[in-house]
């Protein structure tokens, strides 16, 4: 077999997925997008300089695009084959980042909504970090049609999630956050009898996906389902077996 280098700027190999992360320092538990042990394959991270959760959710403006593009181009130069994000609210910059690099870009978990609706034919439930900051622009950036029925439950008022993770404190009660996420899912399930699937928008709440599914019995999507899916398209392996 003959191998050939892809990029002169690539000084190592084997990472398919590059992940744009925000400037925050609370604990990133296994299952979080920002914890590399979440994945069964190596990933590479790049910090979006100067962009915190607070800035992205509450002060989002065009000036934030430049550090996103710089971080994305850094990942591309380091040899990753696709770039994702670590916050669903990055959807605001999905199209611009995609235009700025030459590899696939999927920075927001919201991109899965059309697929979720198509395969179930039902309403898509979304558990979001801060429902007050989620706008039509985020859905437009993810190509989510206004015809898709949605149900949204925010965690901004949850005692631990809203008081610790959203405020970037350096510790939080993992069991308490799990309960808060499950309660948000149960609320959606109780209010909407046409709910077909649930999306966990925030990159901090995939650790609780199993608990959400146990409580609702529904398909549960999040950043991890999206990243794993794209990785599989970039790292296909030969099949073995018998005929």
Image: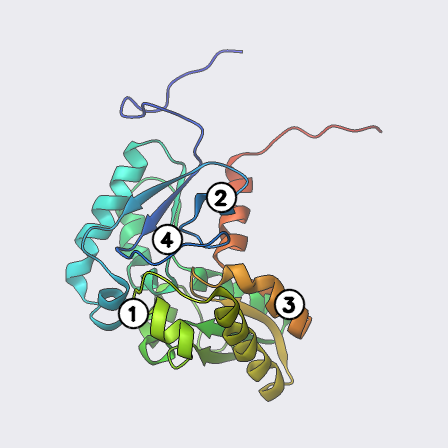
Of tags 4 and 3, the one toward the viewer is 3
- Tell me if label 3 and label 2 are in contact, CB under 8 Å: no
Q: Is residue 35 above or below residue 125?
A: above
The answer to which of marks 2 and 1 sits earlier in the sequence is 2
Could you tell me how many numbered marks the image carries? 4
The answer to which of marks 1 and 3 sits earlier in the sequence is 1
Q: CA distance from mark 2 to mark 1?
A: 24 Å
Q: For this rendering, which residue is in front, 145 or 73?
A: 73
The answer to which of marks 4 and 3 sits earlier in the sequence is 4
At 47% from the left and 56% from the top, the residue drawn is 223
Q: CA distance from mark 4 to mark 2?
A: 16 Å
Q: CA distance from mark 4 to mark 3?
A: 23 Å
Q: Could you tell me which quadrant the N terminus lies in?
A: top right
Examine the image and state in which quarter residue 143 appears.
bottom left
Q: Which secondary structure lies at badge 3?
A: helix
Disc 2 target residue: 37
Label 4 packing within 10 angstroms: few (<14), some (14-19), many (20+) = many
The answer to which of marks 3 and 2 sits earlier in the sequence is 2
Disc 1 target residue: 167
Q: Could you tell me which quadrant the C terminus lies in?
A: top right
Disc 3 target residue: 213
Q: For this rendering, which residue is in front, 143 or 165?
A: 165
Q: For this rendering, which residue is in front, 116 or 58?
A: 58
Disc 4 target residue: 85
């Amino acid at each position: 077999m003959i191998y050939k280098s892809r990029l002169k700027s690539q000084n190592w190999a084997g990472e398919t997925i590059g992940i744009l992360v925000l400037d925050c320092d609370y604990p990133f538990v296994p299952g979080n997008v920002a914890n590399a042990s979440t994945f069964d394959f190596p990933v590479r991270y790049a910090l979006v300089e100067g962009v915190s959760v607070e800035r992205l959710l509450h002060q989002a403006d065009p000036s934030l695009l430049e550090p996103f593009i710089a971080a994305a181009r850094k990942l591309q130069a380091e040899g990753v084959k696709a770039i994702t994000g670590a916050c669903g609210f990055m959807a605001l910059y999905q199209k611009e980042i995609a235009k700025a690099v030459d590899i696939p870009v999927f920075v927001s978990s919201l991109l899965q909504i059309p697929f979720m609706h198509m395969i179930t034919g039902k309403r898509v439930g979304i558990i979001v970090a801060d429902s007050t900051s989620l706008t039509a622009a985020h859905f437009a950036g993810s190509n989510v049609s206004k015809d898709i029925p949605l149900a949204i439950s925010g965690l901004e008022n949850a005692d631990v999630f809203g008081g610790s993770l959203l405020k970037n404190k350096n510790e939080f009660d993992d069991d308490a956050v799990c309960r808060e996420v499950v309660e948000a899912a149960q609320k959606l399930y109780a209010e909407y009898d046409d709910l077909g699937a649930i999306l966990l928008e925030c990159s901090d709440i995939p650790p609780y996906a199993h608990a959400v599914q146990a409580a609702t019995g529904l398909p549960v999507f999040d950043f991890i389902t999206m990243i794993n899916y794209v990785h599989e398209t970039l790292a296909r392996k030969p099949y073995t077996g018998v005929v």
